[in-house]
Amino acid sequence: MAASSSTFTRNPTSIATSFNSKLSLSLFSPRSIKLPYIHPQPIIKPLGSHARPLPVLRATATPSAESTNATTFHGICYVVGDNIDTDQIIPAEYLTLVPSNPAEYEKLGSYALIGLPASYETRFIEPNEMKTKYSIVIGGDNFGCGSSREHAPVSLGAAGVAAVVAESYARIFFRNSVSTGEIYPLESEVRICEECKTGDVVTIELAESRLINHTTGKEYKLKPIGDAGPVIEAGGIFAYARKTGMIPLQSG
Amino acid sequence: MTEKILARASEKPQLSPGENIWINVDTLMTHDVFGPGSIGIFKREFGENAKVWDREKVVIIPDHYIFTTDERANRNVDILRDFCLEQNIKYFYDIKDLSDFKVNPDYKGVCHVALAQEGHCRPGEVLLGTDSHTCTAGAFGQFATGIGNTDAGFVLGTGKLLLKVPPTLLFVMDGEMPDYLLVKDLILQIIGEISVSGATYKSMEFVGTTVESLNMEERMTLCNMVVEAGGKNGVVSADSTTFKYLEDKTSVPYEPVYSDEQARFLSEYRFDISKLEPLVAKPHSPDNRALARECKDVKIDRVFIGYCTGGKTEDFMAAAKVFLNSDKKVKVPTFLVPAAQKSWMDLFSIPVPGSGGKTCSQIFEEAGCDTPANPSCSACMGRPKDTYARMNKPMVCLSTANRNFPGRMGHKEGQIYLASPYTAAAPALTGYVTDPREFLH
């Protein structure tokens, strides 16, 4: 389709980007394409086969007063440990569900983190529920390691997670989170997973890169999401590319 | 080497680690689990009538959820077929008759092994696949890594992807390989050394006299587990071994790429192979390294020899050698899962050296192993519940696969030990984790 060929003949010039943190991937800012900086603002998309639930629309049916807008997430957190691999996030037996099918997308969400061992006594999603009451997941090192399955960030997003805050990520999981726009993969500076408990009420202020745990009263600095932010905000790599003119808008 | 391959793919003279670049993709691989998702995204974003960027550069290999009655799994292979017909995809290794894989002339088996056997892995090229173990192909001196469905959908439409150039870790392995060690032991040693996140976002380059002595299947085993250390990709320089392997498999011209003399590496690790001992990775992580001989009190319930990491012809020959030397029967159920059609056929045809003409299959049968199964990913990932040999209740399993995270093979409380084919065959005979030197004098 013409969409692809016209835009990519002008290869962006080499971008030498230096990073403060090893994982802040400034993946999506080719210099030769001029973009206004897109200030985060709530974006309402009509529900249809193209739409994915965005933070704004993430209204879970729980009384825990979870509210979000694109710059702040507020809710209760679920804490996991190090090396949570994608088999634990979404076991292989559920991979026959195809996320681009809306009904299967919902079903996928209901299985998020079902692979966690029995040592996690409080389960992420109650049996018979389709969504989670925990909109924020707090993890340790190497979150999302293992298989490349994109179903992992997708199931978390479908379940109602707005953001994951981990010490570090495995690369494919991080990439998939950004490309799909399903969740914000945020990084903490310290091991927040050891200082927070499942059920703590937290707020994440994206613009200030800050997490506040209201239950303990402590605040934590997060690493800035950088250029990956606008991509997730837009709803993923394709939506971002269309929004910024990298590829033409779809007709119809 | 990775920097040079990516430089060529992005049409730039030179690159440094950290740069974000658009690269041209030479080959995109997908299979039955992530293919339908990628196709769905491709159609949604580029349009129902869109065409893939190059019908000869997309390779579609059903292999993961094949021999099952699960309707959705079978539907997914149908989705692949419909897409291939519509797009006139040149390389589609189809399977229609599930009752007997042999009557499907195109079906090959596990994608990573099939890619190599069908000549799709070529030095100097860029191969992307919707599977984390796509890094296996780095054995051919190319840049090969795994991506998700959305990225794959993007590549299907444009043939390009935005990637960041990784820095490289150098692993120098010298010394003659003792006859009780296999490549699996080497990579378990490395992962144990640097941990499951030690190579995150980095490239792993393997050099040294030991590496040069490995054949292609061994190099594939080495690169297969790069992702288990968090690695972005792994590479082994292409040499005469590579060229010979490719001679009868591909006529597409290729140009190998080599690291410069003054290439810079982030860190360097050196190993004297002659001093290493057989290893296992204990539950529940590939970096939970331990000496096999120190785990001899661990009772096991079953053994798996197979999959992309340990189900190639060479791997079975190694296991057969152990059984041959012992001349005894296995004490626990021992499952054999060849990675590909060719591996399966070799099991039944190639004589094992020193056996007086017996094939692997005969040796396995005499030892009391299960009949070799249909080539596929099988129980490695605990797929649909009716998968052959899936772990449906908690037990201790010794496997030649590449991951042992909780629930990997089915049951969440199952315990999986990872090992080389030697170190998997020996325990089959004793019922406990065993150092294979007991059977390999």
Image (cartoon, rainbow, N blue to C red):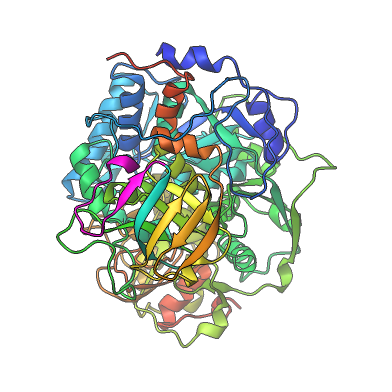
| B226 relative position to A87: left or right | right
Q: In the rendering, at what x and y percent does residue B163 appear? A: 58, 35
Quarter of the image that includes the C terminus of chain B: bottom right
Quarter of the image that includes the N terminus of chain B: top right
Q: Camera-side residue: B221 or A32?
A: A32
Residue at 56% x, 47% y is A224
Q: In the figure, residue A26 lies in which quadrant?
A: top right
Q: Camera-side residue: A158 or B378?
A: A158
Q: In the rendering, at what x and y percent does residue A16 appear? A: 70, 33
Above or below, A68 relative to A133: above
Q: Which residues are magenta?
A: A55-70
Residue at 34% x, 78% y is B301
Q: In the rendering, at what x and y percent does residue B320 appear? A: 47, 66
Magenta span: chief secondary structure: loop
As drawn, the residue found furthest toward the left would be: A128
| B110 relative position to B238: left or right | left
Residue at 34% x, 32% y is A43
Q: In the figure, residue B289 lies in which quadrant?
A: bottom right
Above or below, A208 relative to B92: below
* Residue B105 visible, this angle: no
* Residue B366 visible, this angle: yes
